Amino acid sequence: MKTLRCLLLILLAVVVVPSARAHVGSKDVFETVSSGQYKLFVTIRMPTVIPGVAVVEVRSTGAPVTGLHITPMPMTGEAAKHPPTSDAMQRSTTDPAFFTGSIWMMASGSWEVRFDIAGAAGEGKASVPVPAVAVTTLKMQRGMGVVLGLLGLFLVISMAGIIAAAVREARLQPGQTAPASRRRRALIAMATSLAVMGLMVYGGAKWWDAEAAGYAEGVYRPLEAHAGLKGDVLDLQLKSFRPSDEEAKLSRSNNDLLPDHGHLMHLYAIRQPEMDAVFHLHPELVGPGDFRMTLPAMPEGRYTLYGDIVHANGFPETIVAALDVPASMTGGTPGPDDAIAHPAPLSQGMLGTTYKLPDGYTMVWDRPAGLTASTAYEFHFRLLAPDGSPATDVQPYMGMAGHAAFVKTDGTVFAHTHPEGSAAMAAMTLANGDGGAGGPSDGAMDAMPGMQMASSQPLSNAVDFPYGFPTSGRYRIFIQMKHGTTIETGSFDTNVQ
């Protein structure tokens, strides 16, 4: 029965079409990891069903890499101590720095892909965390259903004919004609076999429907979120729901969160439908699943809230809620890490590759000539001083050179990313063994690639973000960088083919 169930799940994987909710609508993972002199730009295209196959692509820089092996393994629990045999990635025959491979993700949960590196600088290891979840199901394609139905009908009728022929003629000598009694028994046998096989088909259909319904119950759903206002205080409550057996493997609750960049939640509030007001906020946890904060002054209207959290096992999640802000809300003082921007409304046309900031600084996007969906990019942004020269007073913003949010204008895609990639830093810390039993510490995070402590030495005025747009359409991108004590938010628009 276990083998049969596994085969059923794999068959279900064939008839599933994606509608991802990792981040929001962005299931693939883009990450830059380092190990000694090796640097890997990793793209992991996660399956939309579990069990399923993840496709891994790696471009290496730094010391030459001669071989890569990849291993999928849970990030926590007993299974994390017993990894399976690794799979060798295939090196491109035309580009020796490019490798491809695939791995089976056999169960839902918080996983990591471990890379064993061989090359000119000796052996190295690095890991990238990935959330493994089934994200949607659809009915079987109509054409395939018709073909399988006809084949099944043919098999049932053929089997009934074989049974009738056996009853009618099996005991006759060659050349003899079946008597009327045997012909009657053959007809009865045929009718009986058709009835029995009909009942078997009916029972099989019921079993299939039950298994399919059970699988559908395991499709990933983010924690429910309800947002309300009490004066100018946001009350955002995360509700745990009773999970199915499949969802229970994710080990999620509303009270098991890890700090990421010093905050338990990174909350983007974006006014809809014009996306002309955006806030990067950090509410505080005051009780299980209960986040609160005094909002800064916000223009009235309906806002979509995207809240990034990381669970204790490294599983990242983006909760989504709506909030109506009245004109009467006065607002309070923004927090030290809160960022605010008021770009031009979407209806006024496309924003370009240069964005003028309120204090005279300018942010520039060195945009590629053409952008296509499902393609990995490393997007390059620069911060310029009022005189047009490179900014010389850039400081880390929450430990990073910058933060980015890629948002599709219809709300179906939201991804909050960092210069190292799209994985949550708390999950990166767990995957690379720096968190200890209690989860990632601030000190461990500061030691991670891409994490930079505030310093009297300014950073480069340029920052890169690995990412790939999951679908075509219009996107608005928000880039946050800090110079001196000022947090800037640049806004850019693009059409993805």
Image: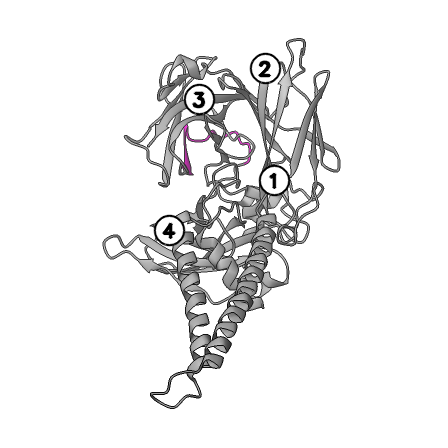
| Residue ID for mark 1 | 222
Q: CA distance from mark 4 to mark 1?
A: 28 Å
| Residue ID for mark 4 | 57
Q: Earlier in the sequence, mark 4 or mark 3?
A: 4
Q: CA distance from mark 3 to mark 1?
A: 28 Å
Tell me which amino acid carries mark 4: Glu
- Residue 149 in the image: x percent, y percent? 43, 57
| Residue ID for mark 2 | 301
Quick one: quadrant of the C terminus? top left
Asked whether 477 or 301 is in front, the reply is 301
Q: Start and end of the magenta stretch?
A: 453-466
Q: Are marks 3 and 1 in contact (CB under 8 Å)?
A: no
Can the viewer see residue 105? no
Tell me which amino acid carries mark 1: Pro
User: Could you tell whether 44 is left or right of 437 in the image?
Assistant: left
Q: Please report the residue visible at 41 percent of the width from the left and 23 percent of the height from the top.
A: 492
Q: CA distance from mark 2 to mark 3?
A: 20 Å
Q: Nearer the viewer, mark 4 or mark 2?
A: 2
Judged from this view, the residue extending furthest toward the right is 287
Q: Nearer the viewer, mark 3 or mark 1?
A: 1
Answer above or below: position of 472 versus 484: below
For mark 1, give the secondary structure: loop
| Residue ID for mark 3 | 491
Judged from this view, the residue extending furthest toward the front is 180
Q: Is residue 155 magenta?
A: no
Tell me which amino acid carries mark 3: Ser
Quick one: quadrant of the N terminus? bottom right
Q: Please report the residue visible at 52 percent of the width from the left and 36 percent of the height from the top.
A: 24
Q: Nearer the viewer, mark 2 or mark 3?
A: 2
The number of numbered discs placed on residues in the rendered structure image is 4
